[in-house]
Structure formats: C-alpha cells, structure tokens
Image (cartoon, rainbow, N blue to C red):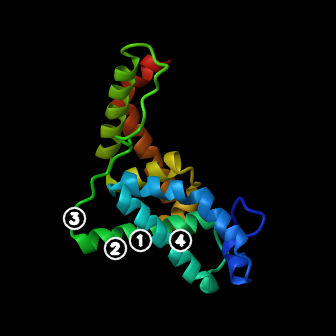
Amino acid sequence: MGGSEFARDPLVALREGDHGPFEGFVRSHARILVAFFRRQGARPEEAEDLTQEVFLKLYRDAARYRQEERLLAFAFRIARNLWIDSRRRLAAAPVPGLLDPSAEVDAGLAPGAGLEEGERGERLERSVRRLSPEHRAVFELCVIEGLSYGEIALLLGVPRGTVKSRMFYAVRALRSALGDLLEERT
C-alpha cells in the first residue's frame, strides 16, 4: 500500500472528515503540479487553473479513492489526463519546455558565466525536446518530478520494464547529443 510522505494518506483522511492532511498536501504540492503543466506548455495562468482542477478532482473523488499507490503519482495521472483533455478541447499543439523563461538569473555568477550556463541549459532543453514523446515523458517524470519507475508505470499505464527501457534509451540519446557538454563538466 502506497501512501505519501504524510503520516496519514490525505484522501483517506479527507474521506473520514479530517481536512488537515489534504490541505497540507495541496500546499506542499501545488508548485510541483504547476511546474508540470508549465513544462507541458501551459501558460502560467492555465497551469494554475489546471492545478486547481487536479485538487478539485482529488477532493471530489476522495470517496472513491483506493489507496493503492502514492498520492502524488495518482495526482500526476489526473494531471496528465487533464492536460490531454485540455489540448483536445483547444485543438492546439503543446509547446513543451524545461526552462521557465521568467526564472531569475543568479547574480553571483562571474561575467559571461550566466550566458554560458544559459546556452548549456538551452542545449539541454533542445535535446530533451528531441526525445520521442514516450522517452521524454519518462525522463521528465523521473528526473524532474522525482517519481519512481513504479509510479511512472502506474501513471503512464505501462509495465515497469517499459519505463526502465525508455529511461535507458532517453539517457543514451541525451549522452550522445550532449557528450561534449558532459565532458566539459568532468
């Protein structure tokens, strides 16, 4: 039985009338879900709206929730489905991205270092965007969201071995594309 990092599963507690754990889950995971939607291509306002929809869906469906997996993985599956539905409704292609263009630059960097880091980041982002959608999804969920292979398998509805294979090929493709960049760092 999964749970979350909370002592008590927030949806089980909610179902039993205790709102505290669910409120804590919302506060501690809202930014993670907003970031997920932003990487998928959502505008900031849209990402916040979709995040609210995830929490509303969790709240409304608490009575039907089965505690079989970690709540965050369950929330990401809802988020993924909401994203797909929103794209279908809008009939618009997503504009994926890993880097938030509004992110602040570290003022403590030496002159020119920020530009160099920015170029490396852009190169990494381009390389990740070139991965197949299946490989990119696994890479982002594992590396950026910190989900386990088992959680990713549940989220994507594929066997755990498929997740491992996709991650292997994603990392191999990124190493190939970024080999010289990786060598500079060592």
Q: Which residue is mark 2?
A: 85
**Amino acid type, label 3:** Ala
Alpha carbon of mark 3 to alpha carbon of mark 4: how far? 24 Å
**Structural distance between the alpha carbons of marks 4 and 1:** 13 Å
Comparing marks 3 and 4, which lies closer to the viewer?
Answer: 4
Q: What is the residue that sits farthest to the bottom in this orientation?
A: 63
Mark number, residue 55: 4
Give the image quarter of residue 179.
top left
Q: Secondary structure at mark 2?
A: helix
Q: Are marks 2 and 1 in contact (CB under 8 Å)?
A: yes
Dot in front, 4 or 2? 4
Secondary element under disc 4, as helix, strand or loop, is helix
Q: Which residue is mark 3?
A: 92
Label disc, if present, on residue 116 of the rendered structure: none
> Mark 3 or 2 closer to N-term?
2
| Residue 22 percent coordinates (x, y) | 66, 70
Q: Residue drawn at (46%, 57%), measured in percent from left and top?
A: 34
Describe the element under mark 3 as helix, strand or loop.
Answer: loop
Q: Which image quarter: residue 68? A: bottom right
Left or right of 174: which side holds 30? right
Residue 81 tag number: 1
Q: Earlier in the sequence, mark 4 or mark 1?
A: 4
Whether pointer 3 and pointer 2 mark residues with C-beta atoms closer than 8 Å, the reply is no
Callout 3 touching callout 4 (CB < 8 Å): no
Three-letter code for the amino acid on which mark 4 is drawn:
Phe
The mark that comes first in sequence, 3 or 4, is 4
In this orientation, which residue lies closer to the viewer: 126 or 44? 44
Query: Residue 117 at x, y = what percent?
Result: 39, 24
Q: What's the residue type where badge 2 is placed?
A: Asp
**Quadrant of the image for the N terminus?**
bottom right
